[in-house]
Image: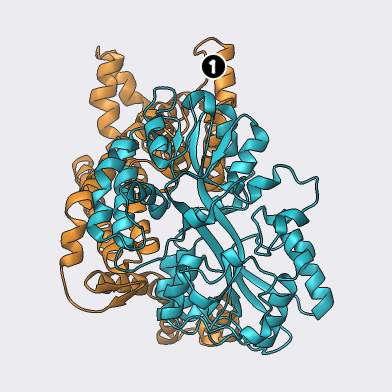
Chain colours: A orange, B cyan
Amino acid sequence: MSAVLINDPAGDPRIAGRAFIGRAAQARLGDNLFAGIPALWLFVFFITPLAFTVVFSFGHSTFGGIALGFTFDNYRQALSGFYLTSFLRTIQFAVTGSALCILVAFPAAYFIARHAGRWRGVLLVVVLIPYFTSFLIRVMSWQILLQRRGPLEGILNFTHIYSGPLDLLDTQTAVFIGIVYAYLPIAIVPLYVVLARIPPALIEASRDLGASRWRTLVHLVLPLARPGIATAVLLTAVPMLGELVVPTLLGGDKGVLIGRAIASQYIQSENYALGSAMAVLVLIAVAVIVGALARLTRSFAEVSA
Amino acid sequence: MTDHSPLTGSRLSRRTILGLLGGVSATAAFATAFPGIRRANAATTGALNIYSWPDYFSADDLAAYAAKSGVTPNIATYNSNEDMFAKLSSPAGSGFDIVIPSSGWIKQLADKNLLQPLDHSKIDFSALDPSLLNRNDDPGNKYSIPKDWGVLGVVYDPDAVGGEIKTWQDFFDAGAKPNVSGKIRLTKSASETVGPALWLAGKDWNTATVDDIKGTADFLKGFAKHVKTFSSFDPAALASGAIVLAQANQSAARGAIAQNPKLKWVVPGPWSEIWVDSYAIAAGAPNLDQAYDFLNFFLSPDIQVKETQYIGYPAAIAGLQGKLPADVKNADLIFGGAGLDFSKLTTFIVNPDTIAAYQDVQNQVQAAAGG
């Protein structure tokens, strides 16, 4: 992309700006071109494949290919029997995973925002650094931690919290441990942002007026944290709808989620039409979630203003 | 289709990692939209493009070939036959000379005109093992030359299982025992999950109808609750006792037995699978002469012996077992164990009419295993 800019002076707003200073129309053209590059990128690499997926979803599958057409058969199949069950199971999985994530993230964010003092920045960095390493490597590390004769078994046996071989790997528990771990940083950050912005005076006032810590949390902190919670749900639940790495690596690939089911239609069954229909349904589910959460945070903004 | 990994040393094998990034096929499907993205294939001589499984040639032998011919092959890799099929079907798949599909995919590739018939005058088949030639997946070896092969079997801890496994019935019965239930590994390959159930019902997996295939679902879903994992074969899990009964191929089993010598390996009856990864020449191969030159070099007996030691699967040359150095451990396991009966082995041939039914059963079994 940058090579294009350098070879094409009109596309570079700095050069264009210098040559035609004061000529608003020309400057606007430069701006438009500059904005056009990401738009083109989005069109080629996001909209076009998406359009193919939608078109494929109405077609007939030939082995490893598509005969274009217009049929709802793929959607009928994707919304019945096993595939519907997988779809519902995936939604349940995302809701549970997201809830667990926020349950763990909230106290952590609360502590960093309100009690960490000058260590706030350091703690946030500590939370975020793992997020910048490879997702795959982080999840695979849990295989080593959780496996038989692994470090966790050693620690639990040594401290007599649990004795005997530990069979956590390839269970649902391991999947949720991995999921919560993987998505924790992106749940903590939005919660931290809203919690740090609650004026300390409000909490002091609540305590002065006789509210218990619990009442203060439920009636003051949680309502004020609502946009952060909604954002955290959005950032964790949406990717979990497409999750297939964690269940594969930590759950022994048991319990087929929709991400895995779609991959199997494309890769193993060579049925691009059904796979596309399932992918479109996931997109619709995501759009509904995003829409609902966006509404939730907006109504909040209106109330507070 | 087949579930064979030369990198059986670790659960974190490269193929596992790459397999997870399995969106590759979908990418290949969309590649039809971008005919501009083509493989560079300008050179018609002095180059050789190979499309292969990862780590499927020893670096020493490739260097020896480069020294002899002056050509260093360009090797691109795939992690499943499905990926390979999708890529070769798309414009991104042009420009390859040699591909190495598993035998069951040769018919599909040939039917799509993605392979070219071999010129038998340019290849010496005489040194190859006759039991690997002229099989039902490619009669007369019109398109393919066997490279190496594997069998589907079972590796198990006889103490936990409390007896000997001889048939797939024994395998399923053992799985329900209290010491074994929850410590079983099944493969992710649909045919290798459904196949044993079909064989026990007296059916051939290549002629089974969609109803036959779906008919195994209830039985297999009932068995699924005993399964711990469908992930890649992990020798460490068998060494630690986390898994005591596992479907595996002979080379993976050999890796596990090296870590835990009390484990046993069996190829259960009445039938089991043989897959033969085979050299084939892509339609429109730009470097045809170079391709034949490469094949003849790699089919020569001493290279086949070295390749067998490197990849851990037997190359196709006749009498290979006698040619291996004496210090190769558990050498008979490389060849599927003592007394392997080739007449009781069958190759799964991919059939567009039934492949989705197999995969549906596999998905249901994996879902049922999740409770």
Q: Secondary structure at mark 1?
A: helix
Q: Residue B104: x, y in percent?
A: 46, 66
Q: Is residue B183 above or below residue A267?
A: above
For residue A301, what is the image quadrant? top left
**Label 1: how many Cα within 10 Å (few below 14, some 14–19, many 20+):** some
Judge whether A161 appears above or below A279 on screen: above
Q: Residue B296: where, in percent of width, then height?
A: 72, 76
Residue A151 visible in the picture: yes
At which x and y percent is residue A2? Answer: 58, 75
Quadrant of the drawing holding the C terminus of chain B? top left
Judging depth in this view, the residue of B72 and B113 nearest the camera is: B113
Residue wearing tag 1: A156
Q: Nearer the viewer, residue B111 or A19?
A: B111
Residue at horizontal 60 percent and vertical 81 percent from the top: A6
Residue type, mark 1 in image? Leu
Q: Give the residue displayed 25% in from the left and 60% down from the top.
A: B210
Residue pictured at 34% horizontal, 72% vertical: A63
Q: Vertically, is A53 above or below A112?
A: below
Q: Nearer the viewer, residue B315 or A200?
A: B315
On what subunit does the disc labeled 1 rest? Answer: A
Q: Is residue B261 left or right of residue B348?
A: right
Residue B301, located in which quarter of the rendered image? bottom right
Count of residue discs: 1
Q: Position of residue A175 (x, y in %)?
A: 41, 36
